[in-house]
Image (cartoon, rainbow, N blue to C red):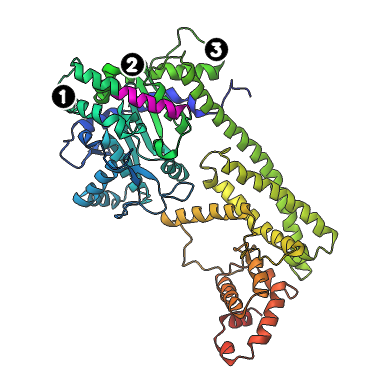
């Protein structure tokens, strides 16, 4: 693969993004607001040049959590500050840093934070809000941003800036953020030798003792008093802390295999801005950010800087604001490749050094992965165009069958004409295409937000509604046992996944207040039946008990009322009309049924 002209944003704009963030003023203003907040308060809200800054105290002295090795807990606690929609790709609620969640929950319960947010949201104009925090305050700011984003308020545009913040959540939280397209809402500023952003990658048993020795000195610095690490006990505590954290991050970076309960659950998400005396660069890929948290900590000067760097973000921002605006060149270019040069510039800006082979490989791997994503999507776009021609052929087939009075489900099931076999060939080609897409998503060969993109959701939904009835017909025509398509798990995995994509998107739209207006009632039947499993429900109703038929009757009646069923279902020769005539002939003998059956009334009105 040629990497001379990559499309990835990681290296072509990593330094440019850092330069923009540093020069536009919001980082310096955010840090200034952080410095002005007392550690005894809950939050401070100030407005500057039309932007509202909400900052949270660092509470660095409260870092250590005695519950569990890494101080994690489920984000869905008994107070339910966050919604049940916030889940990882496995459907489970994410794990988060318990101390940060407890702090944020206390702010919600014991301050006017909610009232202030309500005041801002009640304004008619769109309002930009920046949540900022240092140390644990950064983790609290992250949770506050997620909390507000979940409100889905159109007039509010939140952004989060953290300085030296510990990691907040596990991979599941990152997946939820990515799925909602919120990753761009978070900027985590990390000074090269600041140990705090890496701290939760090590268990508390490895960090508690040295950290307890260092915390008082951090507190002194936060009160703007000069302090050094000349005292032997502090120097030794710093060395122990850094060594223990470094060993843990080293195992994670090397993909060390061990029992999952012995590894840190925390993972990065959002944009990470790594800063050093040589400049700054941004990384957006989670795995690359995790590895750079390790590699940027490898330096002879780290021991002396781990205290000062955690509180030195103000001086650092002043330095890089000017530094990043100047053109940088590597003294000894290691490659003529623009891709390789981009990586080297990134590493130099982070203070790692262009010659660090492990760090170079980590960023190169992230770039290759992004290029792989881009290449896969480009190929799928080409194949999608071809697949749409197959769908057009099946639409023609559907119309032809309808003209002949029986509908395409029944025609395909009978396979009585050459066109039915041709339609089957298109069905198989489409099956291969969409099965491949689902497999690529599940094997992480496509971006994590792929399944939330409207283009693929809409294309997959059209495919499912048009073609799954043919899959059902094929199954009932060729099956060799009495297994039901739905009741006994025969339904194809790709249809289940594609339906889940749509349901998740619709749920998101409803939560944002953008769902289908219940006041708007369809006046015409759908061109494609909304429930792609309608014919499977019919097949099982034909073979089931009277109670099952009653459930099917109610199901069909609701679809008729909502006009979410295709008109071809009611063609005279369709399987549904055959079932209806047989079912009605039996039920009509009951006066109670004749008087109370809603489907009888609906079918009468449609006849």
Residue 346 image offset from top left, x and y in percent: 44, 20
Q: CA distance from mark 2 to mark 3?
A: 24 Å
Q: Which quadrant of the figure contains the N terminus?
A: top right
In the depicted view, which residue is nearer to us: 531 or 217? 217
Left or right? Give the position of 510 relative to 234. Answer: right
Mark 1 surroundings: few (<14), some (14-19) or many (≥20) residues within 10 A:
few
Q: Is residue 130 above or below residue 222?
A: below
Q: Is residue 144 above or below residue 483?
A: above
Q: Secondary structure at mark 2?
A: loop
Q: CA distance from mark 1 to mark 3?
A: 44 Å
Left or right? Give the position of 320 relative to 463. Answer: left
Give the residues drawn in magenta, as a range: 241-254
Q: Quadrant of residue 32?
A: top left
Q: Which residue is mark 1?
A: 224
**Is residue 62 a member of the stretch shown in magenta?**
no
**Which residue sits at x=34%, y=26%?**
245
In the depicted view, which residue is nearer to us: 461 or 126? 461
Q: Which mark is residue 335?
A: 3
Extreme residue in the top direction: 332
Q: Quadrant of residue 598?
A: bottom right
Q: Which quadrant of the figure contains the C terminus?
A: bottom right
Q: Is residue 244 above or below residue 565?
A: above
Residue 384 image offset from top left, x and y in percent: 66, 44
Mark 2 surroundings: few (<14), some (14-19) or many (≥20) residues within 10 A:
some
Residue 578 image offset from top left, x and y in percent: 72, 77
Q: Which residue is mark 2?
A: 277
**Which residue sits at x=72%, y=57%?**
395
Q: Is residue 142 above or below residue 520?
A: above
């Amino acid at each position: 693969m040629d990497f001379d002209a990559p499309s990835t944003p990681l290296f072509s704009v990593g330094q440019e993004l850092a330069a923009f963030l540093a020069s536009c003023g919001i980082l310096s203003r955010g840090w200034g607001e952080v410095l002005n907040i007392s550690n005894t308060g809950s939050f401070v809200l100030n407005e500057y040049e039309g932007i509202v800054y909400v900052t949270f105290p660092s509470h660095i002295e409260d870092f250590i959590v005695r519950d569990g090795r890494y101080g994690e807990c489920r984000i869905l606690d008994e107070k339910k500050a966050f919604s049940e929609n916030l889940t990882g790709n496995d459907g489970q609620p994410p794990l988060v840093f318990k101390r940060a969640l407890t702090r944020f929950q206390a702010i919600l319960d014991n301050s006017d934070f909610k009232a202030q947010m309500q005041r801002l949201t009640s304004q008619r104009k769109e309002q930009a809000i920046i949540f900022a925090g240092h140390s644990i305050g950064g983790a609290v700011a992250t949770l506050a941003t997620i909390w507000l984003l979940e409100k889905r308020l159109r007039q509010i545009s939140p952004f989060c800036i953290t300085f030296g913040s510990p990691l907040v959540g596990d991979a599941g939280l990152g997946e939820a953020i990515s799925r909602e397209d919120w990753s761009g809402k978070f900027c985590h500023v990390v000074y090269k030798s600041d140990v705090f952003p890496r701290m939760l990658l090590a268990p508390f048993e490895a960090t508690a003792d040295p950290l307890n020795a260092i915390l008082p000195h951090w507190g002194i610095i936060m009160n703007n008093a000069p302090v050094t690490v000349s005292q032997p006990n502090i120097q030794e505590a710093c060395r122990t802390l850094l060594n223990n954290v470094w060993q843990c991050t080293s195992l994670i970076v090397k993909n060390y295999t061990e029992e999952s309960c012995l590894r840190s659950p925390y993972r990065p998400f959002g944009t990470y801005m790594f800063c050093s005396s040589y400049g700054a660069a941004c990384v957006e890929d989670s795995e690359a950010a995790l590895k750079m948290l390790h590699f940027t900590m490898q330096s002879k000067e780290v021991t002396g800087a781990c205290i000062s760097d955690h509180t030195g973000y103000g001086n650092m921002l002043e330095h890089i604001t000017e530094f990043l605006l100047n053109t940088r060149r590597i003294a000894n270019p290691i490659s003529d490749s623009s891709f390789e040069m981009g990586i080297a510039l990134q590493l130099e800006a982070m203070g790692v050094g262009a010659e660090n082979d492990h760090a170079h490989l980590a960023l190169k791997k992230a770039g290759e992965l992004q290029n792989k994503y881009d290449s896969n999507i480009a190929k799928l776009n080409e194949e999608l165009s071809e697949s749409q021609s197959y769908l057009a052929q099946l639409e023609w087939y559907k119309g032809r069958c309808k003209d002949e009075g029986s509908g395409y489900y029944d025609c395909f099931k009978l396979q009585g004409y050459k066109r039915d076999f041709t339609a089957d060939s298109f069905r198989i080609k489409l099956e291969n295409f969409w099965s491949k897409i689902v497999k690529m998503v599940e094997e992480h060969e496509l971006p994590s937000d792929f399944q939330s993109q409207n283009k693929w959701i809409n294309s997959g939904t059209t495919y499912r509604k048009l073609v799954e009835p043919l899959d059902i017909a094929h199954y009932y025509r060729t099956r060799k046992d009495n297994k039901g398509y739905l009741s006994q798990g025969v339904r194809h995995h790709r249809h289940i996944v594609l339906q889940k994509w749509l349901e998740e998107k619709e749920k998101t739209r409803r939560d944002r207040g953008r769902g289908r207006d219940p006041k708007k009632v369809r006046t015409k039947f759908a061109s494609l039946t909304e429930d792609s499993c309608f014919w499977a429900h019919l097949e099982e109703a034909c073979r089931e008990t009277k109670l099952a038929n009653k459930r099917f009757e109610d199901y069909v009646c609701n679809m008729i009322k909502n006009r979410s069923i295709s008109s071809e279902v009611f063609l005279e020769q369709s399987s549904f009309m055959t079932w209806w005539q047989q079912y009605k002939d039996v039920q009509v003998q009951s006066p109670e049924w004749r008087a109370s059956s809603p489907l009888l009334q609906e079918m009468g009105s449609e006849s």
